[in-house]
Image (spheres, rainbow, N blue to C red):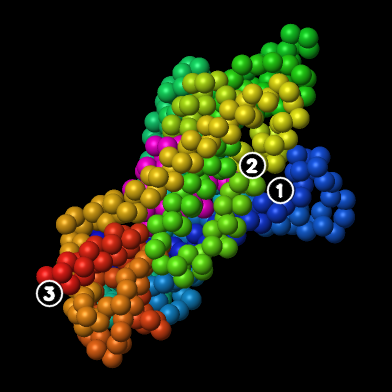
Amino acid sequence: MLDMKSIMRLYDNCRNAVRISYFGFFLIAIGYLIQNESVNIFYTFTNSTLLIIAKGSYELGKIIILNLPLIFMVNLVCKRANSGFPIILALIGYCAFLITISLFAASTYDSYVYNTAMGGLIKSTLSGNPYETGLIGSFIVAMITRFSYIASRNKNKYTILGFLNKDSVAIIYNLILSALAGLIIAYLFPIAFGFLGKLISYISGNLADARRIALYGFADRVLSILGLGQLIRYPFWYTSLGGSYSSILTGQVVVGDINIWNYIQDAASTYSGAGRFITPYYVINMFVVPGIYLGMYFSMSDKKEKTYHLIPMIAIIGMSVVCGNPLPVELSLLFTAPLLLVIYLVVVSAVFLVMSYFNIYLGFPNVSNEIIAAMPGSFPDYIINLRNINLTDAVTKIFFVGIVFLVVMFLLTLLYYRFLAYDVLQTGKKEEYAVEIIDAVGGIQNISRVSNGLLKVNVELYDLEIVSASKVQKIRARRVTETKEGISIELGVSSEIIARNLSRQIKKQKKEKK
């Protein structure tokens, strides 16, 4: 069973990768904003050096995002030992994993099904191209690498591989197991993709059905979190599954939601439903995601923590609104608050449902055909549509619907951190944590104040000298650190619940003593 310490350890292993995802999208945002035609209408950037920097920033950010699975894998294995060897081991295993997939992968799928990052290097030397496995593949190889490394450290010199050193044995283990995993994935992928094909076929069967669009929204975000978003986006964004439009005047046939949107804008034509797969992102990026961040911020009771997080919170909310992509916050929730992620996905589905049900449509000029690094639903693309009188109604409705969902997501986030974050892991043990903490710090009489940050409980003490180091070490927490005022205990997203319960226990015991 996953306990709080295990969840925090997993987050600790993936924390840097999540931060890198923020940085990658930040670089994309800089390049996107400077080169975005919607922004250039208000202010045109003409400095050649600035434009080169913008292009470089965008391309660098795109490379980071394309290789996020690889970055997560490296972060997972590098925590295992004070050595760079596990990283080398993981890279070797990942190459073996992809090469094996490419040898057995079918070549009948469209290009978006295959790996475009490291897979591109493999394709240049082999006839085939490996399937895109996203975070699933990188996590599989990371687990294999950790197993191989540990097993090699415990090898017996009297075994068949006893004459080899530990590192050589680790490489052999990793190559064999990674190749075997690649073989399994090569045969399982077509089955999984077949199920996804049925889902795509069901959704495309009636694009006027708001419930099917809601199902698309849920699947889109789940697959995007796993690094597989292109598997469902491409068919609806760029093929006839996302709709088709035939011009009466020219006879030209346009397919795909984004292509139709761009065409009808340029040709001043009309088409009911263009932008249906993009419109919800204006609400998600500008309202739902900020609602999560605001809920996180106001769940903290420690004033110093609030002050410390204020500027970063404003910055990431601004990044989401101005050049949004919800993936960074989704990855954060995946490793810190999985239940809140599920709640968020339900809200996202509701946004898709509402937008489709009320026929609110506003597209996205993604003329570069980007999928993974695409940033639909940004504020510049939203505000520029005010210039088009035919879109004023959609722009206005998106704003008011967005305000409603911002409040809903804000309240749900507060509700989660206040009541739900802990019991999902270990029901009914809040009191035990309170007793453990009180006992470790020398009793209630030594506690001055209890407050919480986003992931930790801060206990201010009168006298640090009477704190029991041995009892503090036994507290079931990821980390306990000493501060000027007392101790800080990392308890993950359950920190607010435990801090509030601890405060109640203190008040209760003080009343009993009176």
Per the model, the C-alpha gap separating discs 3 and 1 is 63 Å
Residue 87 appears at what percent x and percent y? 48, 70
Is residue 11 toward the left or the right of residue 74 in the image? Answer: left
- The reply to whether the C-beta atoms of the residues labelled 3 and 2 are less than 8 Å apart is no
For the record, the magenta segment spans 324-348
Label 2 belongs to which residue? 378
- Quadrant of image for the N terminus: bottom left
Q: Specify the amino acid type for callout 2.
A: Ser
Tell me the quarter of the picture where residue 257 sits.
Answer: top right
3 or 2: tag closer to the N-terminus: 2
Give the secondary structure at mark 3: helix
Q: In the picture shown, does residue 283 fall above or below 251?
A: below
Residue 382 appears at what percent x and percent y? 66, 36
- Quadrant of image for the C terminus: bottom left
Label 1 belongs to which residue? 32
Residue 439 appears at what percent x and percent y? 18, 78
Q: Specify the amino acid type for callout 3.
A: Lys
Which marked residue is nearer to the observer: mark 3 or mark 2? 3
SS assignment for the magenta stretch, majority = helix
Q: In the image shown, does 265 or 166 lie closer to the viewer?
A: 265
Is residue 432 toward the left or the right of residue 20 in the image? Answer: left
Residue at (25%, 82%) from the top-left corner?
A: 446
Count neighbours of disc 1 (C-alpha within 10 A) and say few if under 14, some if 14 to 19, many if 20 or more. Answer: many
Is residue 445 toward the left or the right of residue 250 in the image? Answer: left
Residue 66, visible in the rendered structure: no
- The reply to whether the C-beta atoms of the residues labelled 2 and 1 are less than 8 Å apart is yes
Residue at (39%, 63%) from the top-left corner?
A: 301
Q: In the image shown, does 319 or 248 lie closer to the viewer?
A: 319
Label 3 belongs to which residue? 513
Which marked residue is nearer to the observer: mark 2 or mark 1? 2
Count neighbours of disc 3 (C-alpha within 10 A) and say few if under 14, some if 14 to 19, many if 20 or more. Answer: few
Per the model, the C-alpha gap separating discs 3 and 2 is 58 Å
